[in-house]
Structure formats: C-alpha cells, structure tokens
Image (cartoon, rainbow, N blue to C red):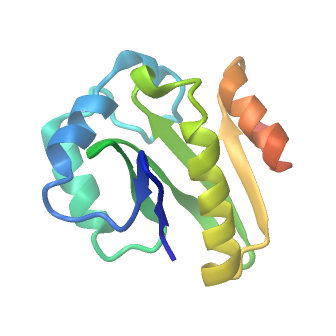
C-alpha cells in the first residue's frame, strides 16, 4: 500500500535516493522547522545513514515529486497505538499541498498497516503550514 499519482510517489527507501534527499533536506529553512534530532547541515553522509537506516523500515518513506526525493514522511515515538507523524520538504515545495497529501497517506498507512489510531505532530511554534496540516487532519499538535 504505497502512494502514486501523476506527480507524487511515496514508497520505501532504496539505494540511490541519497543525492536528492541530501540536496533538498540540506536547507536552513527546513532545519529551522524541525526538532533537534534533525541534522543541520543535512549532508550527503547524513542522507546515506538515513536511507541505510530506513531501507527495511515501515516508518519512514521518501516523498518523490517528479522523480526527485524532496523530503520524508514518517513516524517517530511509536508506542502501542500512538505515534508522532513527521514530514519535511525542501522549501521549493512548500504550500503546494504535497505535505498534506503525504501526511494523509501516512495516516492511512499507519492505521491500516501498523494499527496506529492516535497520531500527534511535533510542530515548531509559528510553523503555520504544519499547523494547518495538523488541523485539517485533526492531529494533536505538540509545540516545541
């Protein structure tokens, strides 16, 4: 159960995803909206580790827009039927509905495949776009 449309694909990580993941994730604007665990700068070596750690994962997936890995959608802090949804995108792709589509897919995947029924999101205070996504999806927001 993965996502594919004319412009967007969400599927498991694979070798070769690293260059565009590093390119779009290594951005101060992205890092400024992410929790402390997110590497900044997000180097090619960070992308190598991220992809290697998630090759067999059912918790993190690349967001592929017209062939480029522009970000990630996934889950953290899974406990029982609860988890925290995480999404990041390169700034060129903000405010295009991509984050909302990716989060909605992740919520559906989490419920159907992982039996997770309660999602929350750690959102940096002032991140209006992330707040709107959480609001639309009726996800609990935890500000940091």
Residue 89 visible in this rendered orientation of the protein: yes
Q: How far across and how far down the image is residue 117, in percent? A: 79, 72
Q: Nearer the viewer, residue 37 or 139?
A: 139
Q: Nearer the viewer, residue 65 or 49?
A: 65
Q: Quadrant of residue 20?
A: top left
Q: Quadrant of residue 96?
A: top right
The residue lying at 45 percent from left, 27 percent from top is 93
Q: Is residue 91 left or right of residue 75?
A: left
Instruction: Tally the numbered discs.
Output: 0
Q: Nearer the viewer, residue 81 or 110?
A: 110
The relative height of residue 88 versus residue 102 in the rendered view (above or below) is above
The residue lying at 39 percent from left, 65 percent from top is 11
Q: How far across and how far down the image is residue 124, in percent? A: 65, 27
Q: How far across and how far down the image is residue 136, in percent? A: 82, 41
The relative height of residue 132 versus residue 61 in the rendered view (above or below) is above
In the picture, the quarter occupied by the C terminus is top right
Q: How far across and how far down the image is residue 142, in percent? A: 76, 40
Residue 143 visible in this rendered orientation of the protein: no
Name of the residue lying farthest toward the front: 6
The residue lying at 68 percent from left, 68 percent from top is 108
Q: Is residue 5 left or right of residue 12?
A: right
The residue lying at 41 percent from left, 21 percent from top is 92
The relative height of residue 14 versus residue 95 in the rendered view (above or below) is below
Q: Is residue 60 left or right of residue 56?
A: right
Q: Quadrant of residue 26?
A: top left
């Amino acid at each position: 159960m993965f996502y594919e449309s004319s412009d967007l694909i969400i599927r498991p990580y694979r070798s070769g995803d690293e260059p565009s993941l590093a390119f779009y994730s290594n951005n101060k604007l992205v890092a400024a909206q992410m929790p402390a665990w997110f590497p900044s700068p997000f180097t090619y070596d960070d992308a190598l580790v991220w992809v290697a750690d998630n090759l067999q994962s059912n918790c993190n997936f690349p967001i592929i827009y017209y062939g480029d890995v522009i970000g990630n959608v996934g889950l953290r802090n899974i406990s029982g039927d609860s988890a925290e949804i995480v999404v990041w995108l390169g700034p060129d792709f903000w405010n295009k509905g991509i984050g909302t589509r990716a989060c909605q897919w992740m919520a559906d995947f989490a419920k159907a495949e992982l039996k997770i029924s309660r999602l929350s999101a750690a959102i940096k205070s002032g991140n209006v776009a992330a707040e709107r996504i959480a609001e639309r999806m009726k996800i609990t927001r935890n500000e940091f």
